[in-house]
Amino acid sequence: MSSTQILQEKYAVVFGAGGSIGAAVAKEFAAQGAELFLSGHTKPGVESVTKQIAANGGRAHATVIDTLDDAAVNQYIDDIAKQVGKVDIILDAAGPLAKEYGNGKNAVDLPIEEFMVPLATMLKSRFITARAAARLMIKQHSGVIIFVTGSPARAHVPGATAIGAAFGAIENLTQNLAFEISPFGVRVVCLRTLANTDSRSIQDTMYLLADKLNLTKDQAMAQIAQSNFLKVPATVQDTANAPVLIASDRARMLTGTVVNATAGAALD
């Protein structure tokens, strides 16, 4: 454990903690001193992350929550607040598989049903979890709600219409929610990341694109690295590092904004 932990005495909730990004963020929060409340669709995945955190001296609790169940999410947040007195940080990383929303398909070939998947799952989930947290954090007069999007929030690659539309909506939600609740001491910040080459969604997408473009998976991955100014691939650890700073008191003046961590791939 770090001797300069910047999230000591913080209580953090991570939804979708069984996925690659959610798990990485949870572990980094714990490494920086936060006590974690982790949830996912299946208990084995979340419990695995919880055990890894405990093995490294951290504190974490696992449960199963459907983030599309408004009543269940609100009850979960309320129960945590009753148990420990407050919720300082919330991050929702729950989401569908890349193949479910037609990642890699151009808009003209994308079925409406696939286009709607990220909007009906990711966007809806983000609103439900953020609203539940906001209601509590307003009463506390403190807290940080962190959204995570990706570079398709700004058009720069083909085949990302569905996920790009959802990311754009989440970034807009960041600003509108912050406008309403930041006067009560609650910060809302969105982290825009670059494609994490070791995440499940990007791994799955690369298989699809490699087959479509008659490339090897490694060649497809190399193209991702060439899309940013640094010419290096991003990893889930890169994504996990940024929310730690955003969640900490060192970033107390950040709200209603998008932290662009795409290394220039998706400029504003």
Image: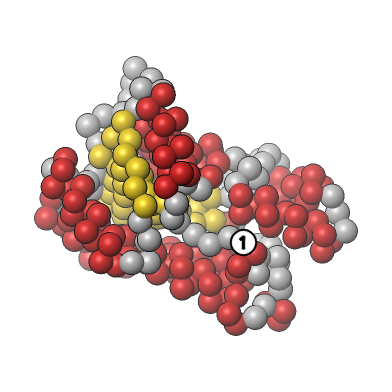
At numbered mark 1, what does the secondary structure look like: helix, strand or loop?
A: helix
Which amino acid type is marked by label 1?
A: Ala
Answer yes or no: is residue 92 visible: yes
Count residues near mark 1 (Cα–Cα under 10 Å), then give few for <14, some for 14-19, many for 20+.
some
Q: Is residue 143 left or right of residue 15?
A: left
Identify the residue shown where x is 25% and y is 36%.
10
Picture coordinates of residue 62, whole percent (x, y): 35, 43
Identify the residue shown where x is 86% and y is 54%.
215
In the rendered view, tell whether residue 261 sits above or below residue 237: below
In the rendered view, tell whether residue 230 sits above or below residue 15: above
How does the figure colour the protein chain or chains?
Answer: secondary structure
Picture coordinates of residue 257, whole percent (x, y): 38, 56
The front one of 34 and 5 is: 34
Q: Is residue 37 left or right of residue 103?
A: left
In the rendered view, tell whether residue 18 sits above or below residue 166: above
Identify the residue shown where x is 70% and y is 41%.
231
The front one of 264 and 165 is: 165
Report the quarter where the N terminus lies: top left
Picture coordinates of residue 180, whole percent (x, y): 23, 65
In the rendered view, tell whether residue 43 sits above or below residue 96: above
Residue where numbered disc 1 is placed: 98
Please, which residue is most extreme toward the top here?
3
Please, which residue is most extreme toward the right here?
214
